[in-house]
Image (cartoon, helix red, strand yellow):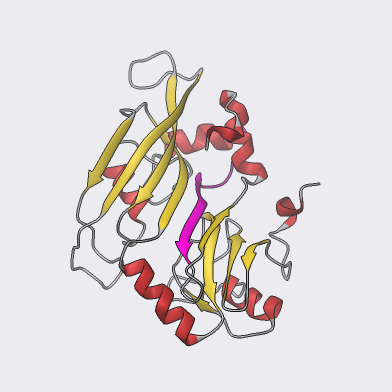
Amino acid sequence: MDYRDTMMDAGMALPVLHADAQLAVVDKPAGVMAHDSKLAGGETDFVADRLRAQFGRPIFLIHRLDRATSGCLLVAFDRDTASALGKVFMSREVEKDYLAVCRGWPEPDFVVDHPLDGGPGKPEKKTAVTRFMRLATGELPVPSAGFETSRYALLRCQPETGRFRQIRRNLKHAFHHLIGDTSHGEGRHNRQFRMRGVHRMLLHASRLSFLHPATGERIEAVAPLDAEFRKAFALFGWEEDLR
């Protein structure tokens, strides 16, 4: 059994993609919130709490991933490193790659530049820019919108800003809704994947690259796909090295 495939068990340690004295990159599982918030809704299992127990030291989250998103999550072990990494993120010197499966066949390369609010209680809209590259296409034998099949695509997503649910909402704006997204996606397409054994939102933080604030070394972390995401790849015969 793939170790990552058992990660949802309460108390299980998260896979570590990189770790040193100042920071770590871990592989966050889908379905677990990064930290406690107003959106928690009674949840008691949080990535931040798991990591405090796992590393036995304070944890400072440098960025956030949605509950349903998996993949690379960067944390610092002290306030000075957290502050330095925060500045690195603000300067856009960080390379963040996500994998997403969307409805339709978009252009090979496209950019969505559409202002977004900050989520509940934050109505002010700010610039939200994401670059997309189409990596592969596929079809399911299900009629859709007058066509004999339903079309889907695998995308590499590179957000240039960090707004609330940015990739998900940018894809909705482009009419290429993210598969498995129950808030911003399309129910009929989500159902087709659930019927085929894919029950998660298909958004994965696959790669994170940044300069270490203490050493200047380029750190690159790559998170593998979990079993549910691999099922989606298998539906269309996509190779995992497409990413």
Which segment is the magenta one?
195-211
* Residue 4: image location, x then y, percent: 71, 53
* Residue 199: image location, x then y, percent: 58, 44
> Is residue 59 found left or right of 170 in the rendered image?
right
Is residue 226 shown to the viewer in this render?
yes
* Residue 94: image location, x then y, percent: 40, 60
Query: Would you place residue 49 above or below residue 116 in this image?
Result: below
> Is residue 128 found left or right of 62 in the rendered image?
left
> Is residue 60 found left or right of 21 in the rendered image?
left
Q: Identify the residue at image location x=20%, y=68%.
A: 123
Q: Identify the residue at image location x=34%, y=36%.
A: 176
Front-most of 190 and 24?
A: 24
* Residue 149: image location, x then y, percent: 44, 17
User: What is the quadrant of residue 163 in the picture?
Assistant: bottom left
Numbered-mark total: 0
Query: Would you place residue 143 above or below residue 99 in this image?
Result: above
Q: Identify the residue at image location x=47%, y=69%.
A: 216
Query: Would you place residue 221 above or below residue 195 in this image?
Result: below
- Asked if residue 157 is among those painted magenta in the image, a careful observer would answer no
Is residue 197 shown to the viewer in this render?
no
> Is residue 80 found left or right of 126 in the rendered image?
right
